[in-house]
Image (cartoon, rainbow, N blue to C red):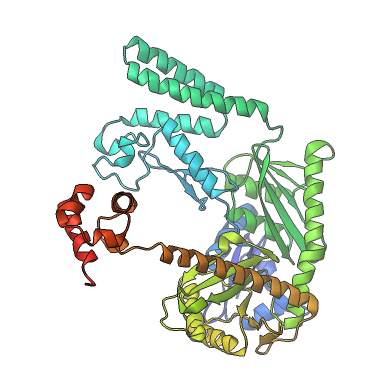
Amino acid sequence: MEYPDKPGVYLMKDDTEILYIGKAKSLKHRLSSYFQKNLNDKAGDIISRTTDIRFFVCENEVDALLLESNLIKEYKPKYNIRLKDDTKYPYLKITDEEFPRILVTRDIEDGKIYGPFSSAKALRKTLKFMRKLFPLRSCSTLKKKECLEFHIGLCPAPCTDRIREGEYQKNVDRLIKFLEGKTDELISELSEDMQKASEDLDYERAALIRDRIGALEKIRIKQTVNLPVLGDLDVVVFPGEKKRCYTVLLMRRGRIVGKHQYVLECTFEEFLTQFYTDHLIPPEILLQSPLDSLLSQFLEKRRGTTVTITVPRRGRKRKLLEMAEKDAEIHLKYVYGELELLRDELGLKGIPVRIEGYDISNIMGTNATASQVTFINGVPSKKHYRHYRILTRGIDDYAMMEEVLQRRFKNREVLPDLMLIDGGKGHLHVALKTLQRLGLDVPVVALAKKEEEVFSKDLGPVSELSKQLLISVRDEAHRFAISYHKTLRKKALTKSVLDDVRGIGVRRKKLLMNRFGSVDAMKKLSKEELNAVIHNESVAERVYERLHQDN
C-alpha cells in the first residue's frame, strides 16, 4: 500500500485491538521503515502481530503530535508508554454554564481549572469558605426550587430568579480574582459596593459586605507574610540514559504541592506529550536543557496560551531543579532497584509499580472485615487503601477472600502489577481461581505469617531483600484490617435497639438516654411517657413497639 508523504498519525491493529499509535513527519517514510530488516525487538513484535494499519493525515507535525497524544489517551494501546503512578491531585473547576458552578474535580477537561492542590479535604474546606464570600450554585441542574444552600448563604438561588445573570457573573469574576491572588483589587471593589449599600440605606447588605472584606483582609495579611517568590510552574527532570526516572515537581503559588515519578524506557517527547495530555500545563516549566520547537508548540497549543520554558543556571530555580534531579537519582538507584530485583526474581513481565496487599480480619467470628493496601513505587499510597465489610456468613477465610476480590475487580479499571495475599497455599489457590473466573491476568503471591514463606504459582523464589518488601506490604494490610475490625467492634458494643427505629437519630437517642438512663427503664414506660421526650406520636409508637418486640 502507498502511504502519503505528509505528516500524520498511524494506528497498528491486530484482529481485536489497537497495538500501537505513532506520529510521523512523513507517513510514507515512517511506515516504510517498519518493513525493513534489523528492527528492534519492540518494533518486530508489533509488526509480527499487526494485521491492519490505518492513518490520519494532519496539516503539520504539531497537529500530528496533538492527535497522537489524544488517541493514546483514548485507546491505551499495549505498546505505547503508560504512565501508571495512578496519582491524581484535586483541582478546582469553574464550569462553562449559564450560571457557572465551582467544584472539586480530578478531571482537567473543560471549564476554567485551578490547581493542583495537595489535599482534597483541605480544598473542600477552602471551597466552602469561598462560597460564603461569593455564593455560587452547586447543583448540577436548576431545579426551580430553593434548597438548603440558599438558606445558609452558599447559593444565591438562580433557579428561582432571585439573582440576575449579570450579578451572578460578578460573583464568578470575583471568585476568579480571589483564586488568582488579586486580593487588593477585590477589597477595593467590595469597599465601593459597601459604600453604595450604605448610601442606599441597605445596612444589612452593607454589613454582609463588611464581613466579607474582613475575611479577605485576614487572608491578605497571610499572603503578605508568606509572599511567594516563585509562581506556578512544573520542574521536569530525567536522570538516567536508556532507563530514565522522569520526575515532575508541581509548584503552585510558590509551594510544592505534588510530585509524579515514572521509570520508563522512552524518549523525552513520548513522556512529555503523554504527561501533559493528562495534566494541567502551568505558565512555566523548568527543564535541564532547551526544548525543541515542536514540543514548545505542542505545549502552547494544548494550553491555549504561551508556556515559558526555562533552563535555570543559578538562583532558586536552579536549586529547585537540582533538588528534583537528586530525588530522581535516589528513586532510580534504591526504590526502583528493589522493585527491579523483585521483578527479576519472580519472573514478572514488568516492574511491580503498584502492589496491592489483602488481609482478612475475623476475630472471634464477628464483624469480619478485609483490607486492601496499595504500595506505589515501593511506598504506601494511603489514598488508595480500601476497607471491606464482609457479607459472607460463617467463618470461612477462603469464601471471604473470594468475595473481596470479586468486589475489588468488579468495576475498577486500574489493575495491580502484583497482588499479595496474607495466607498460605489455600489462599493463593482461591485468589488465582477468582482472577481466572474474572478473566484477569494478575500475578499473585501469598505470604504465610508463621514461617514467612512465600507461595506462588509459576513464579520464582525471592531473596531476603525482596521478601522484606513483601512482608512490609503484608504487615500494613494486617494492621489496616485490624484497625477497621476494632472500629466495627466498638460500634457494635455501643449499638442500641433504638438505632433500628426510623426517626430516632443521635439527638433523640441522647435525649432518651439522658432522661431515662437505660433501655430497660424505657421498656416500663407508656407511649405517652416516651412521646413527652420525643414529641412525635408516630415515632414514639415505633419506639414502644420496638422495645416490646422481643417480649
Residue 341 located left or right of residue 210: right
Quarter containing the C terminus: bottom left
Name above or below for residue 334 compared with residue 209: below
Quarter containing the N terminus: bottom right
Q: Position of residue 506 (x, y in %)?
A: 34, 52
Residue that appears at 82% across and 36% down: 315
Nearest the camera: 102 or 547? 547
Nearest the camera: 313 or 220? 220
Q: Position of residue 367 (x, y in %)?
A: 45, 73
Residue 214 located left or right of residue 226: left
Residue that appears at 32% across and 16% down: 202
Nearest the camera: 279 or 511? 511
Q: Position of residue 302 (x, y in %)?
A: 58, 48
Q: Position of residue 409 (x, y in %)?
A: 50, 74
Viewer can see residue 302: yes
Residue 347 located left or right of residue 87: right
